[in-house]
Image (tube, helix red, strand yellow):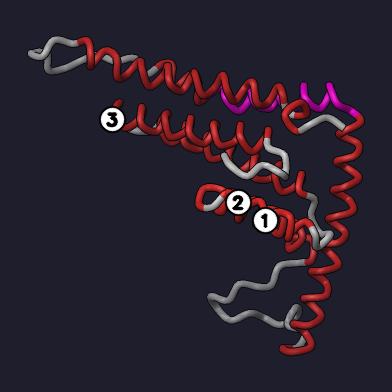
Amino acid sequence: MPSRRRRHARLIATLTDLIGDCAAAAGAVYRPVADAPPEQVDVPVDLWPLSALSLSASTRLDVARAQDAARWPTAVVQEQEDQQRTFAARCAAAEGEQILYEAEFGDTSGRPQPPGVIPLSTVLQSAAMALAGAGADFLTELLDDPEQAISRLHETAATGEFTTKEILDEATDMAVMSGLMSLREAQRMPAPSTAAEGCLAASRSFALAVFVASAEAEATTP
């Protein structure tokens, strides 16, 4: 099986390109201001690079993911088998929690819920949300304490409900999505300087995604 850096090589390369494009788009705002004479009040800037980047980034990333998958078909098959196994384990755990809940509070699935009360998730929903939660927890801990994040990663995978690769891949997807959302938000900003700041915020998320996409479970520092 390839290393994660090889498995996600096209994705990592595209994310790296996007980081440079984010810097260039922000520069199209900052550079004209820096070059303008002190007495100039209104400085024209170019927001087209940011708009083009916001429109194309998600498509470029989708193409990169598809290319990575095509390059490593055996790895894709293994990942799918692992996902089926761990999803079944998470479903079993969710069913067990549901049984314990019903034993304590009774079966409330058929009862109308009072206003403001959120109904319990289904077993399938709980299994899907568990992976998202594991990925989000890893990202949060990675920024605060990388060694603790790796330690918790192994603890979580030891339950059999996740693999370390699944959690890292989920965390990568979240970092990528954060960058895309920052780009979309920057495009809607009324002030060019604020839009440029949003573009640079996207580059930070993409840089984090590069690290997680290439990290093996034994990594300890970002």
Q: Which is nearer the N-term, disc 2 or disc 3?
A: 2
Q: In the rendered structure, are the residues bearing label 1 and label 3 in contact, judged by CB atoms less than 8 Å apart? A: no
The Cα atoms of the two marked residues, 2 and 1, are separated by 6 Å
Identify the residue at image location x=85%, y=41%: 79
Identify the residue at image location x=88%, y=50%: 84
Mark 3, other Cα within 10 Å: few <14 / some 14–19 / many ≥20: few
Where's residue 144, x and y in %?
50, 52
Asked which quadrant contains residue 131, the reply is: bottom right
On the picture, is 133 further left or further right than 204? right
Looking at the picture, tell me which residue is in the foreground, 47 or 67: 67
What is the count of numbered marks?
3
Q: In the rendered structure, are the residues bearing label 2 and label 1 in contact, judged by CB atoms less than 8 Å apart? A: yes
Q: Amino acid at mark 3?
A: Ala
Could you tell me which quadrant the N terminus lies in?
top right
* Disc 2 element: helix
The stretch drawn in magenta includes residue 71: yes
The residue wearing badge 2 is 147
Mark 1, other Cα within 10 Å: few <14 / some 14–19 / many ≥20: some
The residue wearing badge 3 is 191
Q: Of discs 1 and 3, which sits in the foreground?
A: 1
